[in-house]
């Protein structure tokens, strides 16, 4: 597990949220356990598999998970979602309905990568642009950011200037678009119109590898050098 520094807004020194990253499966996908420091209520974001490891992380952090959030429907982000929902008896929120075809084919997708024990599922709530998700005293805005997948969503907390972006944007790269439903032009449009305007100070956790900030990616990400001036 990798600890993430506690997050606070600019006017408060005390951390409002805490998070750990639990890399799961051979894809080393960044499953995120995020919690409200005030209430110790928590959410698991993108439980791609290795559910026993996720449950161990929850126990070690001594938090109460009340929800599961999904950024998009690819197998490495959802492979453990149904199992974890059953284990914790909590609802799944997200992604956008446009990824329904992916959630209907989790088993088939898992078979392609040798992943067993995965299950097709539907979330308890599909998410749309402008929706909000909440855990404890934390509220995140939902941004629909298609391109990597049609139903990809990003979770953004304005107060803490912090986002969870799934596979839309990475440190030094962007999400792959060669999978069914992917479109590079659409992805770049999502980043330029939805993420860059959030502001350079916004830090983010992505689906794989280290996190970054909007400002860092605006300046250095090779995929955004021709697009950054548009936002």
Image: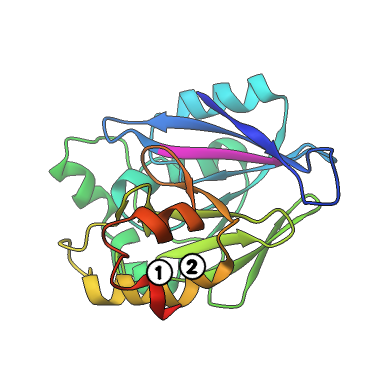
Does the CB distance between marks 2 and 1 fall below 8 Å?
Answer: yes
Identity of the residue drawn at 36% across and 41% down: 208
Percent position of residue 160, x then y = 71, 53
Which coloring applies here? Answer: rainbow
Q: How far apart are marks 2 and 1 (CA)?
A: 5 Å
Circle 1: element type: helix
- The residue under label 1 is 191
Identity of the residue drawn at 48% across and 68% down: 196
Identity of the residue drawn at 46% across and 42% down: 211
Circle 2: element type: helix
Q: Which of 21 and 218 is in front in this view?
A: 218
Q: Is the residue marked by circle 1 packed among few (<14), some (14-19), or many (20+) residues within 10 Å?
A: many
Percent position of residue 58, x then y = 62, 28
- The residue under label 2 is 195
Q: Does the magenta stretch include residue 33?
A: yes
Left or right, 127 with respect to 117, comes to right
Q: Is residue 74 magenta?
A: no
Please say if 221 is above or below 197. Answer: above
Identity of the residue drawn at 61% across and 38% down: 88
Q: What stretch is highlighted in magenta?
A: 30-35
Q: Which of 173 and 125 is in front in this view?
A: 173
Specify whether residue 142 is in view: yes
Q: Is the residue marked by circle 2 packed among few (<14), some (14-19), or many (20+) residues within 10 Å?
A: many
């Amino acid at each position: 597990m990798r600890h993430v520094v506690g997050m606070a807004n600019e006017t408060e020194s005390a951390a409002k949220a805490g998070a750990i990253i639990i890399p799961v499966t051979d894809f080393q996908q960044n499953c995120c356990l995020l919690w409200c420091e005030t209430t110790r209520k928590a959410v698991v974001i993108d439980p791609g598999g290795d559910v026993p490891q996720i449950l161990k992380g929850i126990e070690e952090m001594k938090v109460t998970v009340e929800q599961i959030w999904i950024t998009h429907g690819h197998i490495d982000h959802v492979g453990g979602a149904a199992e974890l929902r059953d284990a914790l008896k909590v609802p799944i929120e997200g992604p956008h309905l446009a990824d329904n075809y992916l959630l209907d084919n989790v088993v088939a997708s898992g078979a392609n990568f040798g992943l067993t024990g995965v299950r097709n599922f539907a979330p308890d709530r599909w998410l749309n642009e402008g929706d909000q998700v909440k855990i404890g005293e934390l509220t995140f805005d939902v941004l629909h950011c298609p391109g990597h997948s049609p139903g990809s969503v990003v979770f953004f907390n304005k107060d803490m200037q912090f986002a969870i972006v799934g596979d839309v944007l990475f440190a030094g790269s962007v999400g792959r678009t060669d999978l069914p439903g992917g479109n590079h032009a659409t992805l770049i449009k999502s980043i330029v119109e939805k993420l860059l305007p959030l502001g350079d100070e916004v830090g983010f956790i992505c689906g794989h590898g280290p996190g970054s900030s909007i400002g860092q990616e605006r300046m250095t990400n090779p995929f955004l050098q021709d697009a950054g001036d548009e936002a």
